[in-house]
């Protein structure tokens, strides 16, 4: 996309001198186009469109969304800065590009610019409470509308060169459609799965919640996650939707496990039997990647990251599907909820099971994992789920050991953009 945009911008020029004789103006033009394309692509990747998730799991699409948004925002800042620099020392430079005016195209551009700045500040630098950040992020998402209007009405290379106009406005239209789908259609349809709390067990730092279907039960595959929004009028836990992997499920009931990590999860144990729950999803292809792999699999889990593996190993135990699995699990002695059952099932299925109690034996290191494998690391597919530090260190060590990145799969919930 970036190459195509750059090429079309170049072709919009009559001669190379148009670029070389006005370098600051040229920088302003190309950074605007590349920044806009990156910003539009970021919205498309974060749309939660079902066909996108088939090839790109939701956690990875949001990492791409964050990266593209950051780079695009930087490009747009450079665009405005270059426009101002090109007019300096004229006093009108600041008012023209930084203040609304009677010119509609410039005004919507200024609004888009400030909303993008606010997005970058609140996402990268300001540590806002989640519920406040969520509202700000929803407001700033309207920058996609203002940016599209700016491109449509502004007098520029886009208005003068038809192929560039079709390309830029076509991508902008797709981005607006993706934004509309996520903000309105997805929320209206995806959250229509209705459940009620039937059991709540708090075991040290983990709360296990069982839910019974009231309307439109989820059609879940092993290892998938969904977004859960709890409603409790008495204790009033946050009504924000958060993602949790399903530990166990059947057509009428699902079970999730929540580790106490922040204000939201601390309020979960106040739920009561009968409390209504709205569920959106399901999401995730992590389980499919494991079940469809015909290579020996190494599963590496840290803390609550064991939940998709627990769901998968239970499924394998019940279905009789044969897999060559080596499971490495590390957690604290306060989170031993899954360990006994994992040990039992692994023994029944003949899986290699390695458990590390981190506050007694130290953290599980990538070197330990590689040392305990019976074959060369290149012979396996690796599946990782857990804290960011564990994922990064293990991924790096595996690549150094010669494991292709195409044989390393991760599930990561550490991304703020997962919201409804």
Image: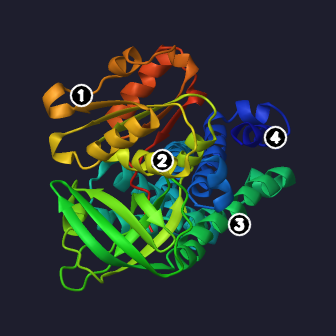
How far apart, in angstroms, are the residues tagged by discs 3 and 4? 20 Å
Quadrant housing residue 156: bottom right
Residue 76 appearing in the image: no
In this picture, is 90 found above or below 4?
A: below
Quadrant housing residue 367: top left
How far apart, in angstroms, are the residues tagged by discs 3 and 1? 57 Å
x and y percent of residue 67 in the render?
50, 43
Q: Earlier in the sequence, mark 1 or mark 2?
A: 2
Q: Disc 1, disc 4: CB below 8 Å?
A: no
Q: Nearer the viewer, residue 10 or 378?
A: 378
With 47 as the anchor, is 306 left or right in this view?
left
Neighbor class of circle 1 (other Cα within 10 Å; few <14, some 14-19, many 20+) is some
Q: Earlier in the sequence, mark 2 or mark 3?
A: 3
Q: Which mark is residue 317?
A: 2
x and y percent of residue 348 in the render?
41, 39
How far apart, in angstroms, are the residues tagged by discs 4 and 2? 64 Å
Q: Disc 2, disc 3: CB below 8 Å?
A: no
List the residue tagged with mark 1.
363
């Amino acid at each position: 996309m970036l190459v195509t945009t750059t090429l079309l911008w170049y072709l919009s020029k009559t001669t190379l001198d148009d670029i070389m004789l006005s370098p600051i103006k040229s920088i302003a033009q190309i950074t605007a186009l590349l920044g806009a394309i990156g910003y539009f692509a970021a919205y498309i990747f974060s749309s939660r469109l079902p066909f996108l998730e088939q090839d790109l799991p939701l956690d990875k699409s949001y990492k791409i969304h964050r990266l593209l948004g950051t780079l695009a925002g930087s490009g747009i800042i450079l665009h405005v800065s270059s426009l101002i620099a090109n007019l300096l020392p004229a006093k009108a430079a600041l008012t023209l590009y930084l203040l609304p005016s009677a010119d509609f195209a410039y005004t919507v551009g200024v609004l888009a610019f400030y909303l993008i700045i606010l997005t970058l500040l609140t996402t990268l630098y300001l540590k806002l409470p989640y519920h406040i950040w969520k509202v700000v992020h929803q407001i700033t998402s309207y920058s996609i509308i203002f940016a599209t209007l700016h491109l449509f009405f502004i007098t520029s290379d886009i208005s003068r060169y038809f192929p560039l106009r079709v390309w830029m406005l076509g991508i902008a239209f797709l981005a607006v459609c993706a934004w509309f789908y996520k903000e309105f259609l997805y929320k209206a349809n995806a959250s229509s799965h209705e459940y009620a709390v039937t059991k709540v067990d708090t075991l040290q730092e983990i709360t296990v919640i069982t839910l019974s279907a009231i309307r439109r039960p989820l059609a879940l595959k092993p290892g998938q996650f969904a977004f859960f929004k709890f409603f409790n009028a008495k204790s009033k836990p946050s009504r924000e939707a958060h993602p949790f992997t399903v530990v166990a499920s059947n057509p009428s009931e699902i079970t999730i496990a929540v580790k106490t990590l922040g204000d939201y999860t601390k309020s979960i144990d106040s739920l009561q039997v009968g409390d209504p729950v709205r569920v959106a999803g399901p999401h995730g292809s992590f389980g499919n990647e494991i079940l469809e792999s015909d290579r020996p699999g190494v599963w590496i889990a840290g803390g609550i990251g064991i939940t998709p593996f627990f769901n998968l190993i239970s499924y394998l135990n019940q279905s009789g599907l044969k897999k060559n699995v080596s499971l490495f699990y590390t957690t604290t002695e306060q989170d031993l909820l899954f360990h006994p059952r994992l040990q039992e099932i692994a023994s029944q299925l003949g899986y290699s099971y390695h458990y590390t109690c981190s506050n007694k034996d130290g953290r599980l290191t990538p070197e330990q994992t590689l040392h305990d494998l019976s074959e060369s690391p290149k012979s396996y597919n690796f599946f990782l789920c857990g804290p960011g530090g564990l994922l990064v260190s293990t991924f790096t060590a595996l690549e150094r050991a010669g494991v292709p990145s195409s044989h390393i799969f991760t599930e990561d919930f550490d991304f703020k953009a997962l919201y409804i």
